């Protein structure tokens, strides 16, 4: 049976297979859906702007994935901070009580509610075969022994000892961290950036099967949800409900 009320900060496929068909994706802009979504999107837009400036000097290509410089750890750290901030917001606004010092083991609970491993991000004007990134792929199998995220491990190593871990902050790890932020925002707000000209309409996919992500630069591929985990409601009616949203039962 499909889900009759959307979870807070949780964007999912609708019963008809779309993400925003017939105006039923408008729940993401309701004031009770998320606290200060513009804050998280604005932070990402600044990161994206700085990444595009870096592309003036480091070409987005397979050949540069292993390179490193002092500009790259800066973007890696800022992106991972945004990953943590978005995960915290998702968990806390759904009623989950975070421990005093949450880590990625705690944040990985978001995989259960948002299927982050099912998203992929494409980097435009890429040279080579690695344009499509899936930074959360290791979370796909709950029984896997290795569910670590290499880019997040590089962030931790660089944060705690840059002198010895400097070379771990590679262009590839930084790029995956940025794409992880793209995914987390998409998994909450679809393609809505809360600008005045965004209508959140059900736009058809292009030839690459992806959609333009929040920020207007990256391409995003959304996961296909099992029928029983999709949303099924008439938002035009549900929005008038005193409590149109549910909290995801992490506990």
Image (tube, rainbow, N blue to C red):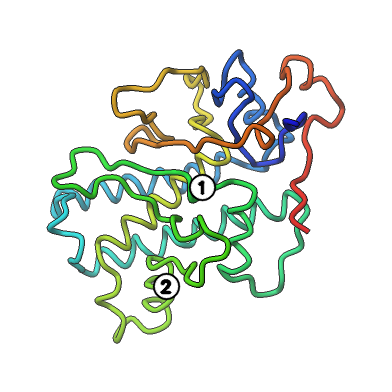
Residue appearing at x 14%, y 51% in the figure: 59
Is residue 59 depicted above or below 207 in this figure?
below
Given residues 113 and 101, the one toward you in this image is 113
Residue 65 vertical placement versus 155 (above, below): above
Numbered tag placed on residue 151 in the rendering: none
Q: Where is residue 34? Give x, y as percent.
A: 67, 40
Residue 244 position (above or below residue 50) = above
**Residue nearer the viewer, 106 or 72:** 106
Q: Is residue 153 above or below residue 59?
A: below
Which quarter of the rendering shows the C terminus?
Answer: bottom right
Q: CA distance from mark 1 to mark 2?
A: 18 Å
Give the labeled residue for mark 1: 184
Picture quadrant of residue 10: top right
Image quadrant assignment for residue 218 = top left
* Rendered location of residue 203, percent (x, y): 44, 18
Q: Which SS class for mark 1?
A: helix
In this rendering, would 122 be left or right of 13? left
Task: Tell me if mark 1 has few (under 14), some (14-19) or many (20+) residues whose alpha carbon lies within 10 angstroms of its own.
Answer: many
Residue in the image at 64% along x and 24% along y: 15
The residue drawn where x is 77% and y is 44% is 247
Where does residue 136 sit, x and y in percent of width and height? 45, 55
Instruction: Return the disc, 1 or 2, that comes first in the chain's sequence.
Output: 2
Q: Residue furthest front?
A: 143
Q: Is 246 on the left-hand or right-hand side of 191?
A: right
Per the image, the residue denoted by label 2 is 153
């Amino acid at each position: 049976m499909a889900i009759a009320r959307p979870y807070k900060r949780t964007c999912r496929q609708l019963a008809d297979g779309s993400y925003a068909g017939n105006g039923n994706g408008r729940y993401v802009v309701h004031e009770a859906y998320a606290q200060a979504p513009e804050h998280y999107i604005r932070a990402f837009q600044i990161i994206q702007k700085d990444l595009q400036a870096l592309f003036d000097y480091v070409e987005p290509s397979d050949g540069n994935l292993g390179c490193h410089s002092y500009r790259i750890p800066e973007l890696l750290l800022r992106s991972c901070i945004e990953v943590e901030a978005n995960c915290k917001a998702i968990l806390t606004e759904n009623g989950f009580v975070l421990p005093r010092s949450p880590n990625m083991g705690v944040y990985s609970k978001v995989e259960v509610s948002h299927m982050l491993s099912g998203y992929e991000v494409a980097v435009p004007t890429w040279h080579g075969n690695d344009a499509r990134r899936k930074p959360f792929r290791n979370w796909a199998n709950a029984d896997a022994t290795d569910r670590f995220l290499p880019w997040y491990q590089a962030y931790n190593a660089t944060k705690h000892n840059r002198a010895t871990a400097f070379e771990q902050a590679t262009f590839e790890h930084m790029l995956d961290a940025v794409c992880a932020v793209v995914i987390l925002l998409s998994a909450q707000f679809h393609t809505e950036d809360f600008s005045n000209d965004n209508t959140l309409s059900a736009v058809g996919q292009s030839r690459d099967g992806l959609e333009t992500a929040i920020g207007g630069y990256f391409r995003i591929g959304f996961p296909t949800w099992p029928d029983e985990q999709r949303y099924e409601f008439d938002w035009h009616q549900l929005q008038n409900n005193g409590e149109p949203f549910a909290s995801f039962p992490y506990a």
